[in-house]
Image: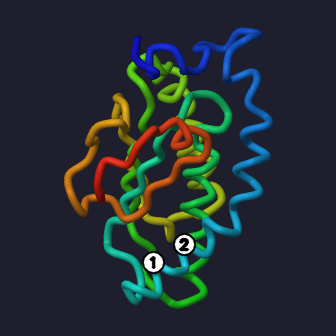
Amino acid sequence: MSAQNVLHMNTGNGESSYASNSSYQKTGVERSLLVLNEAINGIANQLNGFPRCFKIADLGCSSGPNTLFVVTNIIDKVHDACLENNYQVPQFQVFLNDLFDNDFNTVFRSLPTFYMKMKEEKGDICGPCYIYVVPGSFYGRLFPNESIHLFHSSYSVHWLSQIYGIV
C-alpha cells in the first residue's frame, strides 16, 4: 500500500477532521511568514517587479481554515511589495494541490468569502485572483517546467522520500 493511501488528513468538518484540528499547523505557517516574505522580495528583486500574472502553487493545501491562509499571506506580501516599490500589482493564478481524497468541496465553499475579503481589504488595486485545484500526489509531476513562480508547502513535503528532479 502506498504512503499516499495511508498518510492523509481526515476529511470533512467533523470533530476528528483536519479542518477542526489544524491550529498547530496554522501556528507553524505563521512562524514561517518571515521566510515567505524574504522569498517574495527575492523574486521581486530578481525580476525587477512581478510578472503580469504571478503563479503560486500550494502543495498539500488540505481543506479547512488554513487552506487559503497561506494564499492570503502571499497575496498580501506581493501586494505590499508592489506598493512599496511602485510595481504594478499582478494578477494571481493560484493552484491548490492535495491528494485526490482531499475535500475540495470545502475549499470551493470558502472561495466567495475569500474573494469578498480580498476585495474589501485591497479594493480594485489588487489584481484579480484565479484559483484552481490540482488533485494528485506531488511524488509525480504536477506542472509543466517553468510554469510556477512560487511553490509553497508547509506540512506535506516532509513525506517525500526522494527528490524527483528540478521543477
Front residue (pair 72, 17): 17
Q: Amino acid at mark 1?
A: Ile
| Residue 89 percent coordinates (x, y) | 45, 74
The residue carrying pointer 1 sits among few (fewer than 14), some (14 to 19) or many (20 or more) residues within 10 Å by Cα, namely some
Extreme residue in the left direction = 144
**Residue 69 higher or lower than 149, as above or below:** above
Front residue (pair 133, 35): 35
Which residue is labeled 2 in the image? Answer: 39
Q: Which mark is residue 43?
A: 1
Tag 1 near tag 2, CB within 8 Å:
yes
| Residue 70 percent coordinates (x, y) | 60, 50
| Residue 106 percent coordinates (x, y) | 54, 22
Q: Which mark is residue 161?
A: none
| Residue 105 percent coordinates (x, y) | 47, 20
Please give the name of the residue rendered at 57% of the width and 82% of the height, measured from the top-left corner. 83
Please give the name of the residue rendered at 37% of the width and 49% of the height, measured from the top-left corner. 163
Q: Amino acid at mark 2?
A: Ala
Extreme residue in the front direction = 162
In the drawing, does residue 24 fall left or right of residue 140? right
In the drawing, does residue 6 fall left or right of residue 25? left
SS of the residue at dot 1? helix
**Residue 82 higher or lower than 107, as above or below:** below
SS of the residue at dot 2? helix
In the drawing, does residue 144 fall left or right of residue 113? left
Please give the name of the residue rendered at 21% of the width and 58% of the height, measured from the top-left corner. 145
Please give the name of the residue rendered at 40% of the width and 89% of the height, measured from the top-left corner. 48
The residue carrying pointer 2 sits among few (fewer than 14), some (14 to 19) or many (20 or more) residues within 10 Å by Cα, namely some
Q: CA distance from mark 1 to mark 2?
A: 6 Å
